[in-house]
DNA sequence: ACCTGAACACCGTTCAAGT
DNA sequence: ACCTGAACACCGTTCAAGT
């Protein structure tokens, strides 16, 4: 084959190929050569659209953040705690849809347009809730840290690439992990299995988020009462 | 050279070489071939001590967790909030000592002996604080999520391998990141720069942890009053 | 048991060249 | 501008062999 026709590809094509590779082979399977092969193109053709592999991964992660359904938390009439919960659940669903994305998240600076949009939305909600700029900034930090940490911990148990298995299977896997803990050396950890392994993950996620939102104090505005 | 003398290496040697490589070249620089080269040995000699690269990385991460100074949080006479804070600060110091470790953390299941010991300690402290087993298990989840998320977010701004730069330098870098945010599109994020960039990171970390501990309620036991 | 050389099937990236 | 072939300097891992 000779040089080939012009503009046969686009950045979206590259990202789509990268995403397909991520779903099929996990985070480490996203290679420049693999993307090129999937597009039927020479490996170095990818460098026409992205400066290097890191840039592809960055755009890939930001694109996943862009998939979050915005309708759930965009309505200012909804109480602020519900809005933040909807945003957090949306992020969780988007990021855990392919377990590999979370692993990529650690190596990508969160400065893409969609990442910034998420942070901006969070600040908007906290502002609407009645927090001043400084409290909103700190609150945004706290919520971000919780969401990222919770998703990271959840992704750690998803060792296979592709979409996560059904809840039953994950509970079984978690139970197996706890069962392997030496009860003599770590008695409390082994005993915690009964509490932890059976908990539906979404419930646990929302419970923790609620505790974090409690920590933000009781802003006025459209907030719901604390309990 | 011929096969060479017996038992010239140990698992510790391999891990030490891996750690040196991590500090010098970052998470992606830890290669089996690099480790072997540093030990003056053929690449495949590493497979005598570890089944594959993932096992080396797992042991490397767990080893870093083992470096946490236990004296600070081991004393049951100290109020529980202080003990948890000491543990969290110890983990933060150990994990951020080399920025690359945090990036590795995402790909390693937290089931090594030192990881389990940290979890067990957390449960012990919460038990001593007066929480029942179920509350302690949930509390441990919440604190773990916060600590991992906060450290992960902090590590994201440490792009260079090796020990983190002094605080001034990190504030300057953070300010530069915020300055690059388009203020027209993301006004609140841009405005938050004044609050976020200047904050000493340890103070922010402890503040967030305090909000999380507030969320655990007010256990009796050796707890300090809430405020 | 521990290490070797050699090989296999991969990587990211660069460069000069072709259209 | 967009793509190519070829090359460079790497990877993880396996295998048969030597001591």
Image (spheres, coloured by chain):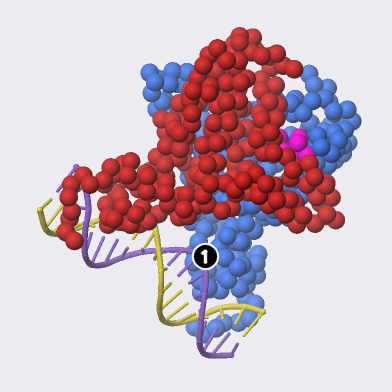
Chain colours: A blue, B red, C purple, D yellow
Which residue in the rendered view is the most extreme toward the top?
B221
Q: Magenta span has A142?
A: yes
Could you tell me if residue A23 is visible in this image? no
Q: Position of residue A41 (x, y in %)?
A: 53, 73
Magenta stretch, residue numbers: A137-143
Task: Say which quarter of the image contains residue B149.
Answer: top right
Residue under pointer 1 = A32
**In what quadrant of the picture does the C terminus of chain B appear?**
top right
**Picture mark count:** 1
- Name the residue rendered at 73%, 50% in the picture: B175
Q: Nearer the viewer, residue A49 or A133?
A: A133
Look at 17% across and 55% down and name the residue there: B3
In screen coordinates, is A81 left or right of A202?
Answer: right
Instruction: Relative to B131, say whether B208 is above or below.
Output: below
Q: Chain of mark 1?
A: A
- The correct choice, above or below, for C12 with respect to B110 in the image is below
Q: Looking at the picture, how far across and down is residue C14, in whole percent?
A: 52, 75
- Residue A187 left/right relative to B196: left
Residue B55: percent from the left, percent from the top? 38, 43
Q: Is residue C5 left or right of residue A2?
A: left
How dense is the environment of label 1, judged by Cα within 10 Å: few (below 14), some, or many (20 and up)? many
Residue located at (37% from left, 56% from top): B34
The secondary structure type at the circle numbered 1 is: helix
Q: Nearer the viewer, residue B67 or A68?
A: B67
Q: Is residue B70 magenta?
A: no
**Residue C11 vs residue D3, the one in the foreground:** C11
* Helix, strand or loop for the magenta stretch, by majority: helix
Q: In which quarter of the view is residue A57 placed?
A: bottom right
């Amino acid at each position: 084959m000779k040089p080939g026709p012009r503009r046969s590809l686009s950045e979206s094509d590259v990202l789509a190929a990268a995403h397909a590779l991520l779903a099929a082979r996990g985070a480490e399977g996203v290679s420049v050569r693999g993307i090129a092969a999937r597009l039927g193109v020479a490996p170095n053709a990818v460098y026409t659209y992205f400066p290097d592999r890191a840039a592809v991964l960055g755009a890939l992660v930001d694109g996943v953040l862009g998939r979050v359904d915005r309708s759930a938390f965009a309505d200012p009439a909804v109480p602020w705690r519900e809005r933040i919960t909807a945003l957090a659940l949306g992020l969780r669903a988007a990021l855990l849809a392919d377990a590999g994305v979370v692993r990529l998240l650690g190596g990508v600076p969160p400065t893409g347009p969609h990442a910034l949009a998420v942070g901006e939305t969070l600040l908007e909600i906290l502002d609407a809730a009645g927090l001043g700029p400084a409290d909103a900034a700190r609150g945004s930090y706290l919520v971000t840290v919780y969401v990222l940490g919770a998703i990271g911990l959840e992704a750690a148990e998803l060792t296979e690439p592709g979409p996560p298995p059904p809840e039953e299977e994950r509970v079984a896997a978690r139970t197996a992990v706890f069962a392997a803990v030496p009860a003599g050396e770590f008695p409390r950890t082994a005993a915690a299995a009964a509490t932890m392994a059976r908990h539906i993950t979404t419930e646990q996620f929302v419970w923790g988020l609620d505790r974090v939102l409690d920590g933000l104090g009781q802003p006025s505005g459209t907030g719901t009462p604390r309990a």
